[in-house]
Amino acid sequence: MPEGPSVRKFHHLISPFVGQQVVRTGGSSKKMPPATLQSLWLQDTQVHGKKLFLRFNPNEEMEPPGRNPPPEPLEGGAWLEEAVCTEPVSVPNAQETSTRPSGSGEPIPRGSDSPDDLGGHSPAAGAQKWLEVRFGLFGSIWVNEFSRAKKANKRGDWRDPVPRLVLHFGGGGFLAFYNCQMSWSPPPVVEPTCDILSAEFHRGQALEALSRAQPVCYTLLDQRYFSGLGNIIKNEALYRAGIHPLSLGSLLSSSRLVALVDHVVEFSVDWLRDKFQGKERHTQIYQKDQCPAGHQVMKEMFGPPGGFQRLTWWCPQCQPQLPSEEYS
């Protein structure tokens, strides 16, 4: 699924629509007709780690905004982005995120590309007003344009992806949500201390979690301490810190753990900045055959027993698995 920097970019793209009314809907949702959102007002949008939240209300009255104001653009003008963000779980997959303001007036696509989960009732019927959005591997948000097929599928068809939800707003623009699960939820619990892109990120809490007697590559993906951190950031931070993915945190020195957390934050901030500047993401180890030093890169599935196994790239020479007595 998209990592913190990508979801923060989605949040930024949605923010200009806050304060506008939904005047037309579409999409492939089965569990709740998109028309349920008809005439509602988008009041707020927040991002917490890898989750995006949208607040709707049946009337125009605005409430105080959330804890995540949209970041200031790093350059002027409209943002154009076409980035590839792959995040393998059990087999390699490609996740595409693309937004191109175009003012397209095309009809809303109908149909179904895969199952979704947009459950519950409309806020107008008295349910909670927060819509929680969780993106899949190919999850994306498009603004004022629909996604187009970039290659033929296995059957040779050039079939365009079908959005799960399309929201047209009174201001004239629209949002198209792809490959995501959505449900009405209680107001989001704000935990900026565990969000790697928050100014309130608690490094001490993160270091305490990393110092446990388990492989650091497991701990890094624990959203309770590293909200927004995904497989790409995990691989890149471990390589930059020179730490083997299976190193036990309890055997690493405090200085090495501090360096690891520093690289997590630094890479995440740089990635977000690059997104706003329209630059491609630059990785040193993720999905590479060789590391920057020219060494052969290893790749293997790692994960806690009974948990998700994630593809992990590392360099045996730059990230050696040292004897236990050499870790401290």
Image (cartoon, helix red, strand yellow):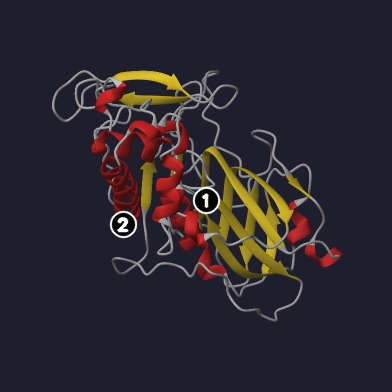
Residue 217, image x and y in percent? 41, 32
Mark 2 belongs to which amino acid?
Arg
- Whether 75 is drawn above or below 115: the answer is below
Q: Nearer the viewer, residue 194 or 123?
A: 194
Q: Which residue is mark 1?
A: 141
Mark 1 belongs to which amino acid?
Ile
CA–CA distance between discs 2 and 1?
18 Å
Q: Residue furthest front?
A: 325
State which quarter of the image contains the C terminus. top left
Residue 268, image x and y in percent? 35, 50
Please tell me which residue is depicted at 39% across the width and 29% down the height of the picture: 248
Determine whether the residue tagged by mark 1 lies in a helix, strand or loop.
Answer: strand
Give the number of the mark in front: 2 or 1.
2
Q: Residue furthest right?
A: 125
Task: Categorize mark 2 by other alpha carbons within 10 Å: few (<14), some (14-19), many (20+).
Answer: some
Q: Is residue 287 left or right of residue 128?
A: left
Please tell me which residue is depicted at 51% across the width and 20% down the height of the picture: 156
Determine whether the residue tagged by mark 2 lies in a helix, strand or loop.
Answer: helix
Label disc, if present, on residue 273 of the rendered structure = 2
Q: Tell me if label 2 and label 1 are in contact, CB under 8 Å.
A: no
